[in-house]
Image (cartoon, rainbow, N blue to C red):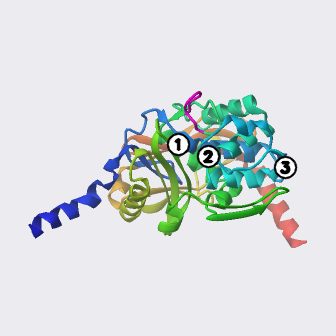
Amino acid sequence: MKKIILFLFLLIPLNIYASAASYVVMDADSGRVIASLNKDNKMLIASTTKIMTAIIAIENMDTSLEIEVGDEIDKVYGSMIYVKKGEKLTLESLLYGLMLRSGNDAAMIIATNTLGYDKFIEAMNNKAKELKMYNTTFENPHGLDDDTKNYSTAYDLALLIKYAMKNPEFIKITNTKKYKLTTNLNTHIWYNKNQLLTSYKYATGGKIGYTKKSGHIFVSSATKDDKNLIVVSLKDTDRFNTHEYLYEKYFNEYNKYQILDKYTFFVNEKNYNKYHLYIKNDFNMLMKENEIKDLVLEINLIKNKKIKSETEVGYISIKLKNKIIHNEPIYAIEKESKIKKIKSILFFWKK
């Protein structure tokens, strides 16, 4: 009997993420999906919607903007920050309430008092298109799904949090465990519902979501040993354990490699002998050691001698097992112009 119990116990870690109907593990630097299940299945996404709500607000408004709460809070229910009509808060404080406590009232206040409700929803969908979230549609800023509904996929939500975690304001808010403020009417203390921030020391942020129709959803990010991962799980009954397990599994299995270095990048192309070809960004990717042999870099250049200096002239394609992981633009600058720029910089520092 003891042997059987031990055998079953040992099986549990291997299947801990089977509780999720859909999940994605993504390398946050390269966007490479390193593990997934039903990653493109469209599902209701509940309050993970608020990641997009936060990004639209941060990118379009000054977060010091003071907002007075109005009748818009009467239109929502469920998870709330319980502010009152006439109460005044900055947009920044509302964003903390949105992300930490998943306030549906905060979402309505933000959307209504920044761009205006309809324009705000339009901006959410436009940003989704920009991020190539092709299976995502937003009808509201909060995620409630009785009258209007928001749909996305594990893969699309991974693209969203990958983008959001490049924004310093968003990072500051999403990994805050406790926030306190005093308004003209009340004092609020908000604790982050993302339990992973407390239970897993490598967690850096994320957002939970739940309705009866959507089930439990979780979007999170973590960093360990300079490796950055994203995990998204939908309809997951054990979401916090699922994410911690997947993080540890893939942090241990993958190493970070620098594929492109913008300072050492060099192309010798006869059609561009008067130009210096360069890239603007480094590119890093998580890989297993035995995958390096399957990595291929392909340079594609426009065969056009009449180009303007400092314009895009092609791209370098990074492929792994014949699958394109990333295309990095290549630019050209006239060698003479480059020398002048360097001399100008040196002269500036000399002064």
Residue 145 placement (x, y as % from top left): 55, 33
Q: Do the residues under discs 1 and 2 have CB atoms within 8 angstroms?
A: yes
> Which is nearer the N-term, disc 1 or disc 2?
2
Residue 213 placement (x, y as % from top left): 46, 35
Residue at the far right in the pictured view: 351
Q: Residue 45: within the magenta? A: no
Q: Which residue is mark 3?
A: 65
Query: Label 3 sits on what residue type?
Result: Leu
Q: Residue 149: within the magenta? A: yes
| Position of residue 158 in the picture relative to residue 66 (left or right) | left
Q: Residue at x 59, y 28 (%)?
A: 148
Q: Quadrant of residue 149?
A: top right
Regarding mark 1 in the picture, which secondary structure is present there?
Answer: helix
Q: Which residue is mark 2?
A: 51
Residue at the far bottom in the pictured view: 350
Q: Residue at x 42, y 61 (%)?
A: 244
Regarding mark 2 in the picture, which secondary structure is present there?
Answer: helix
* Label 3 packing within 10 angstroms: few (<14), some (14-19), many (20+): few
What segment carries the magenta color? 143-150
> Which is nearer the N-term, disc 1 or disc 3?
3
Q: Residue at x 29, y 60 (%)?
A: 13
* Label 1 packing within 10 angstroms: few (<14), some (14-19), many (20+): many
Residue 274 in sight here: no
Q: Which residue is mark 1?
A: 157
